[in-house]
Image: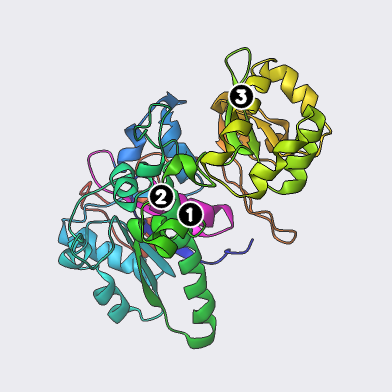
Amino acid sequence: MKLEGYRVVDLSQFLPGPHLTMLMADHGADVIKIEAPGGGDPGREIGLRQGGESVFFRNANRGKRSVRLDLKDPADRETLLALIDSADVVVESFRPGVAARLGFGADAVLARKPSIVYCSIAAFGQTGPYRDVPAHNLAIEALAGTVSVNLGNDGEPAMPGIPAADMASSLMALSAILMALLRREKTGRGDRIDISMHDCLVAWLPNVLGPVFAEDRAPVPKHERTWGGSAFYHIYRTRDGRHVVLGAQEIKFVRALLQELGHLELVELCERGPGPHQQPLVDLLQRTFATRTRAEWIEWFRGRDVSFAPVNDLKEALEDPQLAARGMVLRDAAGHRHLGIPMKFEHEPGQARLAVPAYGEHTGGVLATLGRRSAARGTDETSS
């Protein structure tokens, strides 16, 4: 696999860091997850449980080895540094300054091992006026402006449906780490990576900033191309109270559907671009979709060259035959489901190791290779 032979020391918690290191584990990296006394990663206790573990934790931590260390204890900090000496990558998500104060910040680690790739993930990164402000996904999305355009039918901001800031920072961090490892092949030097969840989410907005950059104004979501101002990029209610979407605005798709519906005269509304002038077409499509059930529309659109999709709930989505064909839902020996690997390589494809580490499960075995014991338990741990 692509990352076989690389070792990652994962000091992160919750979602962004654990998710990116899990993707590295899926592709062969030896990921050692460091967990503190008292229960370890809080993700172990978030949400519904199955088979003795939280589904949240399972979906971000499979294939890793869990080592319990008390990073407030000097002996365990030395153990951590010895473990880092054997690694290629360190990922941490402490508040800025915490790792440095405890003796394993980027400066100390890179001075000790210049070839290490050291990645810090924080809400607002390591610099700037918000550096020390605590925040999780919702607060980041609010500050980045994405909540302001995520409006319900009442026109009020709605809770985001996906953890966009978490996932954006996870994938940006993964990309940065791989770039740094690639560069290290030529220079022998590692690097420090400063990932801000806030930065990463804003970087995910290139296609919707026209009003801000071109006209120095906040967008009006219901008039904009992506958020409701286009009849052919819109959500519609069906006769049975379910929903479907039209999801592409190219004129060829507009013309194809409106010809079927006998309303080619409305094509010109789409040719003029998004905005309130498209409301007559929205009204027509609302009336039209309300005449059949979602299932009937799925069948009606089958084979037609129009970008159409039903609005699935998450259960329906995970049972979709397309995901099954792509191997995106896996089952372990106990029958529990796991998310599959989204990156498909022809050569050396990833292999999801579906075992989820128990808290501290690998402490003894890993520390034995270093000839050390953990102060977190205070005994020699070479047997676990």
Q: In this view, does 270 lie above or below 52?
A: below
The image quarter containing residue 325 is top right
User: Whole-percent x and y of residue 219?
Assistant: 41, 50
Q: Which mark is residue 91?
A: none
Q: Examine the rendering and report whether any part of residue 340 can be seen.
A: yes
From this viewpoint, is residue 333 visible? no
Q: In which quarter of the image is the C terminus?
A: top left
N-terminal label among 1 and 2: 1
Q: Are marks 1 and 3 in contact (CB under 8 Å)?
A: no
State the SS at label 2.
loop
Q: 357 or 79, which lies in front?
A: 357
Query: How far separated are the C-alphas under marks 3 and 2?
Result: 24 Å
Res. 127 image quadrant: bottom left
Task: Give the x, y percent position of residue 311.
Answer: 60, 28
Dot 1 falls on a residue whose secondary structure is: loop
Residue at (49% x, 80% y) in the render = 184
Residue 208 numbered tag = 1
Cα gap from disc 1 to disc 3, whole angstroms: 25 Å
Residue matched to label 2: 219
Q: Which region is colored magenta? A: 15-39
Dot 1 crowding, Cα within 10 Å, few <14, some 14–19, many 20+: some
> Marks 1 and 2: CB-CB under 8 Å?
yes
How busy is the neighbourhood of tag 3: few (under 14 within 10 Å), some, or many (20 plus)? some
Callout 1, which amino acid?
Answer: Val
Tell me which label, 3 or 2, sits earlier in the chain.
2
> Picture coordinates of residue 30 (x, y %)?
49, 58
The residue that mark 3 highlights is: 286
Residue occupying the point 41% across, 69% down: 86
